[in-house]
């Protein structure tokens, strides 16, 4: 795949924690390319390095070795400031624990990334009202228009996660990185979130989703399995393998 | 007994885990109690030093002074010795008004007392170094000699003639330096003067050879030293001036007139800063304390035991700090209560009332700053307490909307400030308190001052002004130190409480610089009004104690002080804010999830 057409690309990615004998390779020599518009699911047992991989791809952690490219720009060598700007433009995060600001309403949470990106001042024609309007549109899109003024504490888990999804989308990111987005949700709420993901996927949104939930993985275009920091399988969910590791160790389909 | 051991163990373990907080509480309460104890003990110590000097120098109960000399005056003074209330006397003796110049040309008015080479039974100056007067030599009063920087063996020039300094002595018959001249020439007002002694013949020669003003005095001891007022009343119509020993003891306090308010009001301000700082710390630990209370409840602890565990740590530290403060006050009070070296003796121990006042202050600081979180911890149901999370900030839509119009650091700063309005008020009060002290210091420095040198020259600085400024400077430094600690504490506590939200902001695209600036702004927003309101508050507070003719410092000094305080706050918040902003985002988010 051409580097420039990949939303995310990682080469020889390594992340170690600890020192000496307690040194652990959370991510071990991972190579990955996620084309634009693809929904990639990463599965694996707890502690296999899925979340660390997601943090590395979003620039929340720096790799011990290897390279990470987002939207054709190498990010592992960027300054913290440049990383922050990259996240504003290119990445939206959805977390298992939602991580909404509890004292802000749903609308205020959703418009927050736009305000941090300075859209209300710097981008022509986009006043704060427009940021607010976009937040309203996104909340409508995730089915929460009626709850726009509610605080997170007044929302159910599924509703909170839908607010988090709307927030992740407010700056039109190139890729949404979701870490166990349904991990805290019941079945109905999970289905709501999956429905939204499917709509976004249909609209061409790129996703990298770390999950334990096979229902989530089943909605993806591609499934990568991780174990001990390494990819052990890489499967296109149309049935074709993109890599051979799964087959080699007997885990692949 | 088992409960006490448990409480002690838990308290010790907690102190070990939170050493910085323990040190901060200790420091804050120590300086507050030491300052209060100093302020309250000044009068008593000054009186005690006078009493000890009086006892060591056979100080008179009354000094009779006449603006004239001559046989009639001598006769009138001598007749006092025959009064039935008088059991001993010294004099009459001459007081000669002259100028004294040291080898390094420091010049001062001096009153020379003509004394016998063998002192009598009343007013026997105590020689602290060298020897008593002899022909051709002079003895200088110790406070005066210290101010001049003159010692035994040096030479001084009095009225143009050089004299060796043969001794240094103290007396209780006159006020402390620079009020040794109890009356001026002709009985009129006196100037700032030092005291020197010469032999009677040398004093007579000095006066006559230069035609210097001379007055007369006689020292009297009464049968009942407490009955001085009755004696003075009986001689009300006399042309003489009488100074009782009580008058001299009170006169010693003139030099300390502003010291007491500086120290006592300073101790209030220090206590206030201590409360704000410790309250911020306690609030920052409220969640942890609540979980701890829940844990104790879960294992069967009664409310009394829980209260004891939560409060004992602060109370015990406050009481240790109280003891430290009292020891510091006891050790430093002689220097502060006797700035002139004109008195001798050791300061008496701090009285029970002072110890009680300082202890009440220490306990009040500990209780006021910790009672609320302690009660909250105790009242929270066990299960809720075990899963306690940080207090949920209120939703403030108008403020959120307003902050949305601002640049990112201000947006973050305003929202952080709004999360904990109580802490913002504490920060504003802390800044205002610091500015009040700085305004007081600047006002003291702005006062025009007459030096003690000849014709008001500043060759001999005004000791009272210097003493006040030194004390105010010390109190201001202590206040600034506590305010610095408070500002760093507020910033760090804010950063720790908001670390999850700041990590979220980072994932949403806020740069570390913006987060850092936001944390600093959160402290600066309340500091700005605090600094502004501190100026009029400082002026108002000073007006309660200042003389009517006190001069206000130039407005640009005050504005500069307020501005400098805000800038210093910005600088102080920068480091903790920067450290907090640089914490790994993923780690903060994971911690929050856990």
Image (cartoon, rainbow, N blue to C red):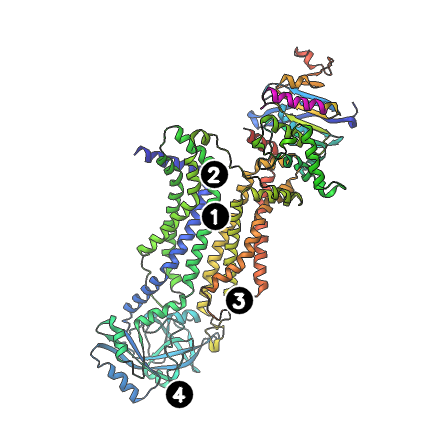
* Image vertical order of residue A94 relative to residue B470, above or below: above
Q: x, y percentage for residue B521?
A: 60, 47
Chain label for disc 4: B
Q: x, y percentage for residue B156?
A: 42, 77
Q: Secondary structure at mark 2?
A: loop
> Which residue is labeled 4 in the image?
B209
Residue A190 on the magenta span: yes
| Residue B415 in the figure: left or right of residue B195 | right
Q: x, y percentage for residue A71?
A: 75, 30
Residues at marks 4 and 1 on the same chain: yes
> Which residue is labeled 3 in the image?
B552
CA–CA distance between discs 3 and 4?
47 Å
| Residue B452 in the figure: left or right of residue B300 | right
The span picked out in magenta is A183-200
First-in-chain label (1 vs 3): 1
Question: Is disc 2 surrounded by few (<14), some (14 to 19) or many (20+) residues within 10 Å?
Answer: some
């Amino acid at each position: 795949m051409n580097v420039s057409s990949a939303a995310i690309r990682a080469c020889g990615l390594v992340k170690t924690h600890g020192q000496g004998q307690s040194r652990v390779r959370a991510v071990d020599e991972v190579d990955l390319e996620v084309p634009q518009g693809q929904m990639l699911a990463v599965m694996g047992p707890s502690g296999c390095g899925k979340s660390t991989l997601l943090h590395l791809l979003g620039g929340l952690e720096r790799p011990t070795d290897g390279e990470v490219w987002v939207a054709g720009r190498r990010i592992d060598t960027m300054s913290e400031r440049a990383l922050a700007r990259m996240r504003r433009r290119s990445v939206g995060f959805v977390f298992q624990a939602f991580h909404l600001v509890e004292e802000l309403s749903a609308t205020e949470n959703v418009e927050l990334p736009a305000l941090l990106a300075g859209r209300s001042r710097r981008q022509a024609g986009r006043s704060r009202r427009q940021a607010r309007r976009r937040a309203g549109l996104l909340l409508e899109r995730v089915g929460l228009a009626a709850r726009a003024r509610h605080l997170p504490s007044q929302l159910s888990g599924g509703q909170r996660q839908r607010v988090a999804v709307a927030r992740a989308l407010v700056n039109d990111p190139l890729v949404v990185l979701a870490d166990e987005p349904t991990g805290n949700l019941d079945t109905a709420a999970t289905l709501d979130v999956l429905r939204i993901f499917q709509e976004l996927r249909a609209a061409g949104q790129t996703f990298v989703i770390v999950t334990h939930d096979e229902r989530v993985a089943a909605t993806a275009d591609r499934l990568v399995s991780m174990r001990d920091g390494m990819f052990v399988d890489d499967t296109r969910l149309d049935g074709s393998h993109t890599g051979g590791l799964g087959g080699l160790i007997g885990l692949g389909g | 007994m088992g409960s006490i051991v448990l409480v002690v163990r838990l308290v010790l373990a907690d102190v070990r885990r939170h050493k910085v907080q323990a040190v901060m509480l200790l420091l804050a309460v120590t300086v507050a109690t030491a300052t209060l104890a100093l302020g309250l003990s000044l009068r008593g110590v000054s009186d005690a030093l006078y009493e000890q000097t009086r006892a060591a120098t056979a100080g008179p109960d009354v000094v009779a002074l006449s603006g004239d000399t001559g046989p009639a005056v001598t006769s009138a003074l001598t007749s006092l010795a025959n009064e039935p209330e008088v059991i001993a006397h010294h004099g009459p003796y001459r007081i000669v008004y002259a100028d004294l110049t040291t080898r390094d040309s420091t010049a001062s008015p001096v009153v020379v007392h003509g004394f016998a080479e063998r002192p009598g039974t009343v007013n026997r100056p105590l020689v602290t170094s060298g020897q008593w007067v002899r022909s051709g030599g002079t003895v200088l009063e110790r406070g005066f000699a210290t101010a001049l920087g003159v010692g035994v063996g040096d030479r001084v020039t009095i009225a143009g003639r050089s004299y060796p300094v043969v001794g240094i002595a103290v007396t209780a018959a006159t006020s402390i330096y620079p009020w040794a001249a109890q009356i001026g020439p002709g009985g009129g007002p006196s100037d700032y003067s030092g005291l020197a002694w010469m032999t009677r013949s040398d004093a007579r020669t000095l006066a006559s050879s230069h035609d210097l003003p001379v007055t007369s005095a006689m020292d009297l001891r009464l049968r009942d030293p407490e009955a001085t007022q009755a004696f003075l009343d009986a001689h009300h119509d006399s042309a003489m001036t009488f100074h009782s020993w009580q008058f001299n003891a009170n006169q010693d306090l003139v030099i300390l007139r502003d010291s007491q308010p500086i120290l006592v009001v300073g101790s209030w301000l220090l206590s206030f800063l201590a409360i704000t700082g410790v309250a911020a710390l306690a609030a920052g630990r409220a969640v942890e304390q609540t979980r701890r209370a829940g844990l104790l409840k879960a294992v069967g602890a009664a409310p009394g035991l829980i209260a004891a565990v939560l409060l004992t740590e602060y109370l015990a530290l406050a009481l240790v700090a109280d003891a430290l403060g009292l020891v510091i006050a006891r050790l430093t009070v002689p220097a502060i209560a006797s700035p002139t070296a004109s008195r001798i003796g050791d300061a008496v121990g701090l009285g029970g009332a002072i110890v009680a006042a300082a202890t009440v202050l220490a306990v009040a600081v500990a209780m006021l700053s910790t009672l609320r979180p302690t009660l909250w911890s105790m009242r929270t149901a066990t299960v809720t307490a075990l899963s306690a999370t940080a207090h949920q900030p209120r939703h403030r839509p108008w403020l959120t909307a307003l902050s949305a119009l601002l640049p990112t650091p201000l947006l973050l700063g305003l929202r952080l400030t709004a999360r904990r309005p109580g802490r913002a008020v504490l920060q504003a009060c802390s800044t205002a308190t610091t500015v009040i002290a700085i305004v007081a210091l600047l006002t003291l420095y702005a006062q025009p001052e007459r030096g003690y040198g000849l014709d008001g020259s500043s060759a001999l600085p005004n000791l009272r002004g210097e003493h006040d400024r030194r004390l105010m400077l010390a109190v201001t430094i202590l206040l600034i130190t506590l305010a610095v600690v408070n500002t760093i504490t507020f910033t760090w506590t804010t950063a720790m409480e908001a670390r999850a939200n700041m990590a979220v902001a980072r994932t949403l695209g806020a740069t570390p610089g913006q987060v850092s600036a936001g944390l600093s702004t959160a402290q600066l927003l309340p500091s700005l009004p605090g600094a502004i309101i501190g100026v009029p508050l400082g002026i108002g507070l000073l007006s309660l104690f200042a003389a009517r003719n006190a001069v206000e410092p130039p407005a640009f000094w005050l504005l500069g002080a307020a501005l400098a305080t805000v800038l210093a706050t910005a600088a102080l918040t920068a480091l903790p804010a920067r450290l907090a902003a640089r914490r790994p985002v993923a780690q903060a988010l994971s911690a929050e999830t856990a």
